[in-house]
Image (cartoon, grey):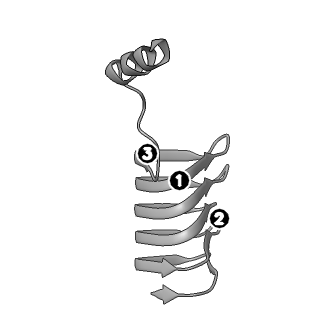
């Protein structure tokens, strides 16, 4: 499903969703598949891969799969099982890069 508008799912859906805006999974919503969107709000259940700028898992929400996002918000009692990849993140400093920065500051 390819959309250029918001989508609200409060039933069952199986497949791939591409939305240029927001996808909201209601409390009775269940998605089995992949979701690519700007913003995903989960109040129901999703199993699959998520690629979004911002993902919000609400108190009754549950995600089982992989999330690739720049922002991930999980409210109390929200459940996430799987792996998370942070988009556009600067790598964490290693001991070698920290040592190089110290040397640059001394010089």
- The residues bearing labels 2 and 1 have C-alpha atoms spaced at a distance of 24 Å
Q: Label 3 vs label 1: CA separation?
A: 18 Å
Residue 77 x, y percent position in the rendering: 64, 42
Q: Which residue is mark 3?
A: 81
What residue sits 61% from the left and 53% below the top? 57
Q: Image point 55% across, 61% down: which residue?
A: 53
Name the one closer to the observer, 97 or 13: 97
Where, quadrant-wise, is the C terminus in this rendering? top left
The residue depicted at 54 percent of the width and 45 percent of the height is 79
Q: Position of residue 88 (x, y in %)?
A: 46, 52
96, above or below 48, in the image? above
**Which residue in the protein does label 2 denote?**
27
Circle 3 Cα neighbour tier, 10 Å, few/some/many (<14 / 14–19 / ≥20)? few
Q: Earlier in the sequence, mark 2 or mark 1?
A: 2
Residue 10 image position (x, y, % from top left): 62, 75
Across and down, in percent, residue 15 comes to: 38, 79
The vertical placement of 91 against 46, above or below, is above
| Residue occupying the far front of the picture | 107
Pointer 2 or 3: first along the chain:
2
Disc sitting over residue 70 in the figure? 1
Quadrant containing the N terminus in the rendered view:
bottom left
């Amino acid at each position: 499903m390819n959309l250029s508008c918001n989508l609200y799912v409060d039933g069952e859906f199986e497949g791939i969703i591409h939305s240029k805006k927001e996808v909201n999974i209601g409390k009775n919503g269940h998605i089995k598949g992949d979701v690519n969107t700007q913003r995903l709000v989960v109040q129901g259940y999703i199993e699959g891969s998520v690629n979004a700028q911002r993902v919000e898992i609400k108190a009754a929400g549950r995600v089982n799969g992989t999330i690739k996002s720049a922002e991930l918000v999980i409210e109390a009692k929200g459940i996430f099982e799987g792996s998370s990849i942070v988009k556009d993140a600067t790598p964490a400093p290693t001991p070698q890069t920290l040592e190089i920065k110290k040397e640059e500051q001394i010089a």
